[in-house]
Image: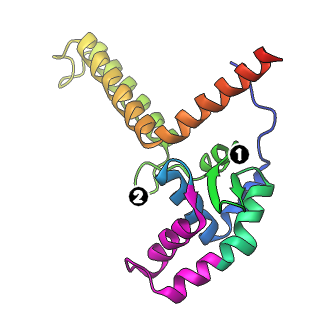
């Protein structure tokens, strides 16, 4: 496994995330899971902002203008999206993952994946140790069963996280494979 040396600096990520419309645009492109047109993206963002589907024309036009004039050029410059002005299409690029690492949450309650895994680990270890030390309620259960349940919870959480991020994961595999193929051809 090769470590990336071209990760976006935190200051640039914070600059990107400072604007709600940019955050929403990145999230909408991620949700689509591929290429989206500027018109489609502006309708998705405007629909979220207005709470109406389809969004009002003025809201959609306002979002479209700000995306084209401000947000997409900035995101393209930083390598977060690939923006083809000719076809008016956008897709996430190599640094989109750097930005998403700052925004990944499991639920609307604001729990991050790292907090969820840390809590699973602490609870699992505590229950297992309690069983091994003969604590009244948990000592009746087989420690192998408890360990299997804990591993099952970790596997389920990991599978859920991979499913939610499937487009990003697939894109990373595609980028890695394409880079490997181009190096082999050279």
Q: Is residue 81 magenta?
A: no
Percent across and percent down for residue 121 are 43, 29
10 Å neighbourhood of mark 2: few (<14), some, or many (≥20)? few
Query: What residue range appears in magenta?
Result: 36-64
10 Å neighbourhood of mark 1: few (<14), some, or many (≥20)? some
Residue 98 appears left or right of 135? right
Q: Could you tell me which residue is drawn at 68 percent across and 77 percent down?
A: 66
Quarter of the image holding residue 128? top left
Q: Which mark is residue 109?
A: 2
Name the residue carrying label 1: 95
Q: Earlier in the sequence, mark 2 or mark 1?
A: 1
Quarter of the image holding residue 85? bottom right
Look at the image and tell me in which quarter the C terminus lies.
top right
Total of numbered circles in the picture? 2
Residue lying furthest front in this view? 86
Q: Is residue 54 above or below residue 5?
A: below
Q: How far apart are the two marked residues, 2 and 1, measured between alpha carbons?
A: 26 Å
Percent across and percent down for residue 18 are 68, 67
Badge 1 marks a residue whose secondary structure is: loop
The rendered magenta stretch, by its main secondary structure, is classed as helix
Percent across and percent down for residue 96 are 65, 48
Q: Is residue 54 magenta?
A: yes
């Amino acid at each position: 496994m090769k470590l990336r040396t071209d990760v976006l600096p935190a200051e640039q990520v914070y600059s990107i995330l400072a604007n709600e419309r940019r955050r929403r645009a990145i999230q909408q492109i991620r949700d689509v899971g591929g290429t989206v047109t500027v018109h489609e993206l502006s309708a998705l963002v405007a629909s979220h902002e207005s709470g109406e589907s389809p969004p009002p024309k003025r809201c959609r036009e306002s979002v479209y203008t700000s995306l084209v004039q401000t947000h997409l050029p900035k995101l393209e410059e930083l390598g977060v999206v690939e923006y083809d002005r000719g076809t008016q299409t956008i897709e996430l690029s190599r640094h989109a993952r750097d930005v998403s690492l700052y925004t990944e949450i499991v639920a609307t309650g604001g729990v991050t994946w790292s907090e969820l895994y840390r809590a699973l680990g602490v609870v699992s270890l505590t229950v297992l140790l309690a069983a091994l030390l003969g604590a009244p309620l948990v000592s009746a259960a087989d420690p192998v069963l408890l360990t299997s349940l804990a591993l099952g919870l970790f596997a389920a959480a990991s599978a859920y996280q991979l499913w939610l991020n499937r487009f990003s994961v697939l894109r990373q595999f595609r980028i890695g494979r394409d880079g490997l193929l181009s190096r082999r051809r050279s």
